Amino acid sequence: MWKRDESVKPATPPAPAPAAPAPPAVSMPAASSERRTQPLQGENVNIGKSVVIKGELSGSEDLTIEGNVEGRIELKENILTIGPNGKIRAEVFAKSVIVLGEVTGNVTASEKVDIRDNGSVDGDITSPRVAIAEGAHFRGSVDMQRSGAKPQAPAVASKPAATAPAPAAQPAAASAQAQKVGA
Amino acid sequence: MADSARTMTDWLGFLGNRRAAEPAPAAVTPAPATPELSHPTKSLQKFLACLQAQENPVLLDLGPVVGSNVTFFGEQLGCRIRVEDVASDIEAHIKKDTTDQLAEFFAKRFTQAPGTVDGILAWDVLDYLDRNAALALATALTQLLRPDGALLGFFSTTESKQAVYTKYVVVDPQHLRYRAYPASRPRQRALLTGDIIRMFKGLRVSDSFLMKSNVREMLFRKNPA
């Protein structure tokens, strides 16, 4: 009885022991090197709560702002998210803008502006698609001009900061999308 | 067979009483929220038709911001919408106890150049104003309208003591949903049709509908230049 147990025990445990650590030993360095090289291509970049930026902010990756930004933000090919703690006092240009915090200034998006619950925008919006949630605050004008529209002289002269929208600058793809939604 | 079945039932009876009937589902499920009824509208479609002739019209909405309305008008008309929440102006004056200055306030309230707005959604804001303030607002709105522009106004035909404002949510061009929210004071009075027409003396009544919801929907047009 005792002898039989001793003979079985040493045979089984060594087999899984080397097998388990083997795969991570090979794959881990590869994964970590990928993370080091690729973070700036598709991932979201955050500007933290305590960060204050004054001036011009531009880039080519999606950005989430939780801090304070004053000036101008330009992410024409990317998504800008203003987080619940974000406070923006700037002219904003982006592909899509999602507002959960506060924005004072005009917002121009080639695809969509989405003001979520508790989000606040005080300024004029120019975008082919605009969504304003039930609990959101909005004060200003919304310009959702159809494609092929002639640029119109600004009829509203409300805010000194307000600039005339530039419908000609909107990409054709965005305008086509607006028409699809409208249909 | 019947005897044997009875015997089995009797034997099973020793194990305990029959299972009690399940409680009625109505007692468990929470009471359903009161549904917001959608009311028919006859004037909205005509208002839209007035603006659809224009290319990229400018629209002024005097109600509180309703996201779905912004989307609706933007997609239907491809327009530029400006939201000017007059109800919040009234509230601010009530809280400061300066309602006597509302007429003066409305005379300078709008910063748009005269004759630059194609359509105005006045909804029912005039019902919440006294005679002088309502006249001042109506005059200011008349000035803002472009020649051939349209103004849509709703006027209650009954007196109400309920201190609520109404958000008019567009369901489709034939239906609106009335969504009440608290106000500091009720509607001031039910305006007579003659008084309304006199208030907007620079405009002509294009259509007027008395709805079953005790609302008179009136569509005004400014004469072409």
Image (cartoon, rainbow, N blue to C red):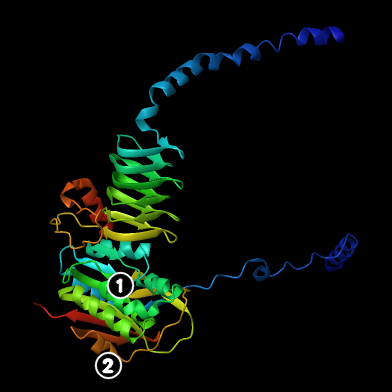
- The residue that label 2 is drawn on is B194
The answer to whether residue A82 is above or below residue A121 is above
The answer to which of B94 and B181 lies nearer the viewer is: B94
Q: Is residue B221 visible from the viewing direction of this image?
A: yes
Q: Position of residue A62 (x, y in %)?
A: 35, 38
Residue B97 is tagged as: none
Q: Are marks 1 and 2 in contact (CB under 8 Å)?
A: no
Foreground of the two, B166 or B91: B91
Which residue is denoted by mark 1 in the rendering? B173
- Of all chains, the one bearing label 1 is B
Please state the horizontal and vertical placement of residue A134, each as a whole percent of the image: 43, 61
Q: Is residue B23 left or right of residue B175?
A: right
Q: Is residue B125 visible?
A: no
Res A150 → quadrant:
bottom left
Residue under the image location 80 percent in, 64 percent down: B19
Chain under callout 2: B
Q: Looking at numbered disc 1 in the image, what kind of residue is underneath it?
A: Pro
Residue B82 point in image, percent of width and height: 27, 64
Relative horizontal placement of residue B153, taking residue B22 as reference (left or right): left
Q: Circle 2: is it few (<14), some (14-19), or many (20+) Cα within 10 Å?
A: few
Report the residue at 15% width, 70% height from top. B53
Judging depth in this view, the residue of A170 and A57 nearest the camera is A57
- Mark 2 belongs to which amino acid? Gly
Observer-nearest of A30 and B85 = B85
The residue at the far left in this view is: B225
Labels 1, 2: one chain: yes
Q: Looking at the image, is mark 1 or mark 2 earlier in the sequence?
A: 1
Q: Secondary structure at mark 2?
A: helix
With respect to residue A122, does A73 lie above or below? above
Rendered location of residue A143, percent (x, y): 25, 58
Q: Is B75 placed left or right of B164 in the picture?
A: left
Estimate the spatial distance between the alpha carbons at disc 1 and disc 2, rounded to whole Å.
Answer: 27 Å
